Image (cartoon, grey):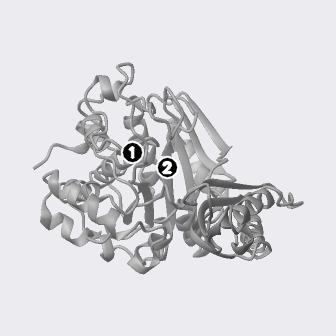
């Protein structure tokens, strides 16, 4: 039997850190999670398509990318039997403890990495201590390696406690592209949850600080836009073309001119453009990747609608056609005050926590809000917490890292919070390398 997760938090986190995989390509990662969950012993384990309907996935990458990362996982020595259910990008899993009468409690942690090449600077601890990403192009630059470690260790701790009820832990893929929250929220495993917890590490909160519940996450959407025109010789017959690049330029200028809204804040951005072939050719095809955000789901919908309309009208102005697709999106959902209070009370009793902040504005976006929204709509309570960590540089940078003292803190905060809503007064002690 494997050593207890709680006795090797840093070891596990570092192993996960070495092998970051992008959204819907978390093949090795999911297999690793399944191994750990089987060793812990759960009452139900749904992997890939058994955990959600694959048709509900958003922002699924191309078959070529999925195949590439699947082969990487095979080449890394991952058990082919564990990988087979994940083929085609059905990654992630849901683990269930069924412990008789009591509330149903949900916990969601995310599992994907980012397309960022990790620093090899000697001052960067993962490089200096030998657990830098081995992929060469991806990195756990947002702490999801920590989140997975928390999820596994919390599940184990709850199993070893006097917990009575049902615990459902969602190991969710594709958070960074807002692609995995919706399918898990629509699944049978999200039904009937009385209390739901989600959590993030850091976010500019230092080691020893806990934010019991976030407020004002931004609703958001990712958009792919294509503009098609007509090619022509730029010198000999420019009037014969319909210039897709010119149309895109008009669209971009128009998008940044979307009016502010009296109901609250919105954000728009065009983050990547690509197109054209040569300086003497009128471009007939360009692509753009954009996003819209809003202080509320309704405000995001306003910004999204305006963004779509402005791409389409700019294309029409230049005798082109625009196709605008919403690749993924997520709603706003706020933490429930009753559950915020439960987390705050639980965190006050955790060694190493020296400051508990009841609430804080999130200021970014998160597709855990799909699960929060589902639980709240069904009459349950939901909370998204932050466990602080000293990180030398910001999230989504090549030198991001976490203070591993936060590993134990996160497990204890989550475990005590879950046991608290289930009416259990004490949590099992952590033991091992992190004590």
Out of 389 and 365, give the one closest to the viewer: 365
Residue 142 placed where, x, y %?
47, 43
Percent x, y for residue 85?
Answer: 23, 72
For residue 70, which quarter of the picture?
A: bottom left
Q: Are marks 1 and 2 in contact (CB under 8 Å)?
A: no
Residue 193 to residue 7: above or below? below
Question: Furthest residue to the front?
Answer: 236
In-image side of 273 versus 75 (left or right) = right
Q: Nearer the viewer, residue 378 or 200?
A: 200
Q: State the image coordinates of residue 170 (x, y, percent, origin top left).
A: 39, 62
Viewer-closest of 305 and 313: 313
Q: Which residue is mark 1?
A: 426
Tag 1: Cα neighbours inside 10 Å, few (<14), some, or many (≥20)? few
The answer to whether residue 134 is above or below residue 435 is: below
Label 1 SS: loop
Tell whether 44 sits left or right of 339.
Answer: left
Residue drawn at x 86%, y 60% is: 259
Residue 91 visible within the image:
no
User: Label 2: which residue?
Assistant: 199
Crowding at mark 2 (Cα within 10 Å: few <14, some 14-19, many 20+): many
Give the spatial CA distance, label 1 vs label 2. Answer: 21 Å
Which of the two discs, 1 and 2, sits closer to the camera? 2
Residue visible at 17% across and 50% down in the picture: 76
Would you identify the image quadrant in which residue 337 lies? Answer: bottom right
Query: Which badge, 1 or 2, comes first in the chain's sequence?
Result: 2
Residue occupying image coordinates x 13% and y 59%: 79
**Name of the residue lying farthest toward the top:** 123
Q: Quadrant of the C terminus?
A: top left
Which element type, helix, strand or loop, lies under badge 2? strand
Q: Is residue 165 above or below residue 16?
A: below
């Amino acid at each position: 039997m494997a050593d207890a997760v709680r006795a090797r938090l840093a070891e596990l986190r570092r192993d996960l850190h070495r092998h970051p995989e992008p959204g819907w390509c978390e093949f090795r990662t999911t297999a690793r999670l399944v191994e750990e969950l089987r060793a812990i012993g759960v009452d139900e384990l749904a992997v890939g398509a058994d955990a959600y309907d694959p048709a509900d996935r958003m922002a699924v990458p191309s078959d070529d990318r999925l195949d590439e990362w699947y082969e990487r996982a095979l080449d890394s020595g991952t058990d082919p039997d564990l990988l087979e259910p994940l083929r085609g990008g059905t990654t992630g899993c849901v683990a269930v403890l069924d412990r008789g009468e009591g509330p149903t409690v949900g916990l969601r942690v995310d599992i994907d990495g980012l397309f960022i090449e990790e620093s090899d600077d000697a001052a960067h601890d993962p490089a200096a201590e030998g657990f830098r990403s081995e992929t060469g192009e991806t990195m756990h630059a947002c702490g999801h390696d920590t989140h997975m470690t928390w999820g596994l260790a919390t599940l184990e701790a709850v199993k070893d406690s006097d917990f009575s009820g049902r615990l459902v832990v969602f190991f969710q893929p594709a958070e960074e592209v807002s692609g995995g929250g919706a399918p898990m929220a629509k699944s049978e495993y999200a039904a009937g949850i009385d209390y739901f917890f989600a959590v993030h590490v850091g976010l500019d909160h230092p080691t020893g600080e806990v934010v019991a519940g976030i407020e004002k996450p931004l609703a958001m959407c990712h958009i792919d836009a294509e503009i098609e025109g007509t090619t022509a010789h730029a010198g000999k017959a420019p009037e014969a073309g319909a210039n897709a690049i010119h149309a895109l330029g008009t669209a971009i200028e128009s998008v940044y001119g979307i009016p502010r809204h009296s109901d609250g804040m919105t954000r728009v951005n065009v983050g990547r453009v690509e197109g054209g072939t040569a300086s003497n050719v009128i471009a007939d095809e360009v692509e753009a990747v954009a996003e819209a955000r809003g202080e509320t789901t309704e405000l995001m919908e306003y910004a999204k609608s305006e963004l779509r309309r402005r791409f389409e009208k700019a294309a029409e102005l230049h005798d082109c056609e625009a196709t605008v697709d919403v690749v993924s999106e997520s709603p706003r959902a706020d933490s429930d005050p009753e559950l915020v209070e439960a987390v705050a009370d639980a965190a006050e009793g955790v060694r190493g926590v020296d400051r508990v902040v009841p609430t804080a504005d999130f200021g970014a976006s998160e597709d855990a809000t799909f699960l929060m929204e589902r639980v709240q709509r069904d009459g349950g309570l939901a909370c998204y917490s932050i466990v602080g960590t000293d990180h030398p540089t910001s999230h989504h940078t090549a030198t991001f890292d976490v203070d591993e003292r936060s590993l134990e803190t996160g497990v204890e905060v989550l475990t005590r919070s879950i046991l608290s809503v289930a009416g259990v007064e004490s949590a099992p002690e952590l033991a091992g390398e992190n004590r």
